[in-house]
Amino acid sequence: MNNTRLKSVLLVDDDPTTNVLNKHFLKKLIPSLEVDAVVNGHRALDYIEAHIDEIETGAFLLILDIEMPIMDGWQFLQAFDILFREEEKEKIIIAVLTANGTEEVVYRALSHPQVKECLHKPLSDINFRKVIENLFLSNI
């Protein structure tokens, strides 16, 4: 766990319904939380690039779906490593979201330095509570 409270979340999932539900769960847990959503890895990279100076180290969670069209989670992680400097990458904590939680997927995801959790779809407020309590100072 880091010593910072969660302040903002970026949901990266190609399913708009999933984004709406996950935003609801997160806002239910932490009403003051800033939650944004994008529908693919390209848009996530654009979002990070536009907001990197505003992101407080260790207070930003990116929830990344692995299976998406256009740019999937694996492609996002590769581009993220190339496009951002180390000190920028360290600002962001990533939780990977997958419907296929095989051992191989979990191992591959957790081998990335910024990926701290591997979550299985569908999520709930209980799952989010555990992740937030594991990764951040509790503000729940």
Image (tube, rainbow, N blue to C red):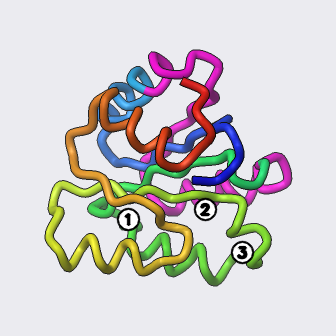
In the structure shown, which secondary structural element does the residue marked by tag 3 occupy? Answer: loop
Give me the residue at 48% from left, 39% from top.
133
Task: Determine whether, in the image, residue 134 is placed left or right of residue 120.
Answer: right
Give residue 50's position: percent from left, percent from top.
76, 53
Residue named by callout 3? 84
Give residue 27's position: percent from left, percent from top.
50, 20
Task: Determine whether, in the image, residue 88 is placed left or right of residue 106.
Answer: right
In the structure shown, which secondary structural element does the residue marked by tag 1 occupy? Answer: loop
The type of residue carrying mark 1 is: Ile
The type of residue carrying mark 2 is: Leu
Residue named by callout 2? 45
Q: Crowdedness of circle 1 by 10 Å Cα count: few (<14), some, many (20+)?
A: few
Q: Are marks 3 and 1 in contact (CB under 8 Å)?
A: no
Q: Along the line of sight, which residue is nearer the eye, 97 or 74?
A: 97
The range drawn in magenta is 26-55
Q: Are marks 3 and 2 in contact (CB under 8 Å)?
A: no
Instruction: Give the CA distance from mark 3 to mark 1.
Output: 20 Å
Give residue 85's position: percent from left, percent from top.
76, 78
Query: Residue 51 colored magenta?
Result: yes
